[in-house]
Amino acid sequence: MSNASSKRSLKRRGFSLIEALASVTILGLGIAAVVGGLGAVARTETRTRQIEAMTRLAQHKFDELVATSTSLGSSTTQNGDFSDQNNSDYSWSAQVEDTGITNLEALTVTVTPSSDTSSKAPTGIVTGLIYVAPAATTTTTATPGRAGG
């Protein structure tokens, strides 16, 4: 009788081959899912950093255009790159649009990667209102002069 009970206890001590294979398969799928998730997080983080850098460049270009440009007129478009800052990875475009309010224009600066022109490429956009001073008008009036002396 003790011989029969010892045989039963020997059978129950380990895992079967199928149980081991199933657990390894489940573990492998779990690891693959985690690694895939980490890859997606890394891509999202890289894209977020790129958008943040482009938005910062757009803000600097917006400030520069407002501070230095006297040619910001209604419905004008300007564009360029950042080679003056030793950064040829991005290009910018600026669009001035009429707001319908006298002397107030909307300026939108958009920065995009120079190498990626697809519609899915990330962009940095800054929009703001700018005051356009009215053109100064000068009028001359004739003043009567004195004759003689």
Image (tube, rainbow, N blue to C red):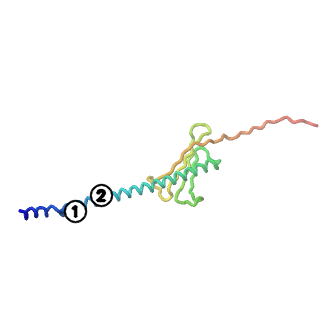
Amino acid under disc 2: Gly
**Which residue reaches farthest top?**
144
Q: Which mark is residue 21?
A: 1
In the rendered image, residue 31, in percent from the top left (x then y), is placed at 31, 59
**Image quadrant in which you'd find residue 43:** bottom left
- The residue sitting at the front extreme is 2
Dot 1 amino acid type: Leu
Q: Which mark is residue 83?
A: none
> Looking at the picture, does residue 107 appear above or below residue 101?
below
Q: Residue furthest right?
A: 149
Residue 146, placed above or below residue 55? above
- The residue under label 2 is 30
Q: Residue at image x 55%, y 46%?
A: 108
Task: Please name whichever residue, 130 or 144, is drawn nearer the observer in this view of the structure.
Answer: 130
Q: Is 23 left or right of 56, judged from the image as shown?
A: left
Quick check: marks 2 and 1 in contact, CB under 8 Å? no
Write the residue at 75% across / 37% down. 139
Secondary structure under badge 1? Answer: helix
Measured as percent of width and height from the top left, residue 4 is found at 7, 63
Quadrant for the N terminus, please: bottom left
Q: Position of residue 14 (x, y in %)?
A: 18, 63
Q: Is residue 146 above or below residue 38?
A: above
Query: For residue 23, what is the image quadrant?
Result: bottom left
Q: In the figure, is residue 102 to the left or right of 6?
A: right
* Real-space CA distance between mark 2 and mark 1, rounded to the nearest whole angstrom: 14 Å
| Residue depicted at 56% across the width and 53% down the height | 79
Residue 46 x/y as whole percent: 45, 56
Q: Name the image quarter holding the C terminus.
A: top right
Earlier-in-chain disc, 2 versus 1 = 1
Viewer-side residue, 72 vs 27: 27
- Secondary structure at badge 2 equals helix
